[in-house]
Amino acid sequence: MIPAATCIAEASDAYHVQTAAIDAVIAHGLPAGEVRDGRVGPMAIPVQWLPVFELMGIKTEDVVNGECQNILAGTWIMAYMQAIQPMQADGASYAAGRYSVRFPAWLQARRQAWAPVVQRAAQLTGIPAALIDAVITVESKYNPAARSGKNAIGMMQLLETTAALIGGGNPRNPEDNIMMGSKYLAQLATKFNGDLPLTLAAYNAGPGAVTKRGYRIPPFPETQAYVPQVIALYSYLQQHP
């Protein structure tokens, strides 16, 4: 049996959640294999999360019965709640499903400056403005000059090959970049029947990576951290536009 401390360290490294925060949750958790009051195992994972893990290719019985798998899954949820820094992800907020976002002044100014373009992209593509906002914030923090190590471009971090398939603009132009990235999100949402986790996983890792794994979130650490970050921020922005 793998010691719990090893599992905690692995989960902390994978999802960038402090070990102290994980320890705080486990202190109020359940034994592996135990289900009580709608919660499961050492991380007391709410049972409504189990279908999400099934989409990721993680079997319910593994989350319920496996100590390490439960710790990894619970830490993934904490990453979801943590979203972008500085979100709070302590034991109390994990249990209650509460979190807050405090944008730095410079990022808030960028969001406000580009809000009209985001709204227009939402109207043209049918993708909610809050989701476009969340994707841009996580992808680039609204930096028009952002470029990734894989040469993804601009605020919505579009690859040249992807931009060429989307068409309709120049990905190096910030406004076009937002429009094209939103159009791509709409295409992926259609392909994956509106399933938000799979749409976001495809945006991050490519649709082929999702379909090849049986329409599940690919087992890439970056993607499995990216999906909860965007969803958490999107959920927050829907309530706090």
Image (spheres, rainbow, N blue to C red):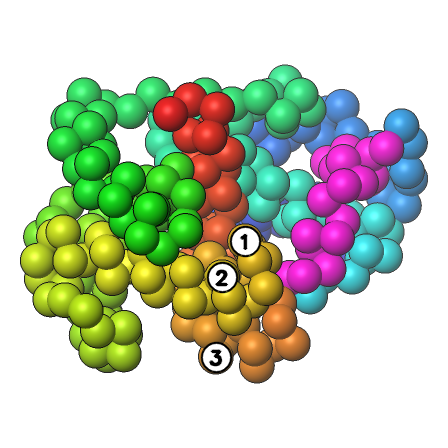
Residue 137 in sight from this viewpoint: no
Q: Residues within 10 Å of mark 2 (few under 14, many from 20)?
A: many
Residue drawn at x 58%, y 21% as measured from the top left: 98
Residue 74, quarter of the rendered image: top right
Which residue type carries mark 3?
Answer: Gly
Residue identifier under label 1: 196
Q: Nearer the viewer, residue 69 or 189?
A: 189
Q: Nearer the viewer, residue 228 or 184?
A: 184
Residue identifier under label 2: 189
Task: Tell which circle, 1 or 3, labels the residue nearer the N-terminal end.
Answer: 1
Q: Residues within 10 Å of mark 3 (few under 14, many from 20)?
A: few
Residue identifier under label 3: 208
Q: Is residue 194 left or right of residue 149?
A: right
Q: Is residue 16 left or right of residue 145?
A: right
Task: Tell which circle, 3 or 2, labels the residue nearer the N-terminal end.
Answer: 2
Q: How many marks?
A: 3
Q: Nearer the viewer, residue 226 or 71?
A: 226
Which residue type carries mark 2?
Answer: Ala
Q: Which residues are magenta?
A: 38-56
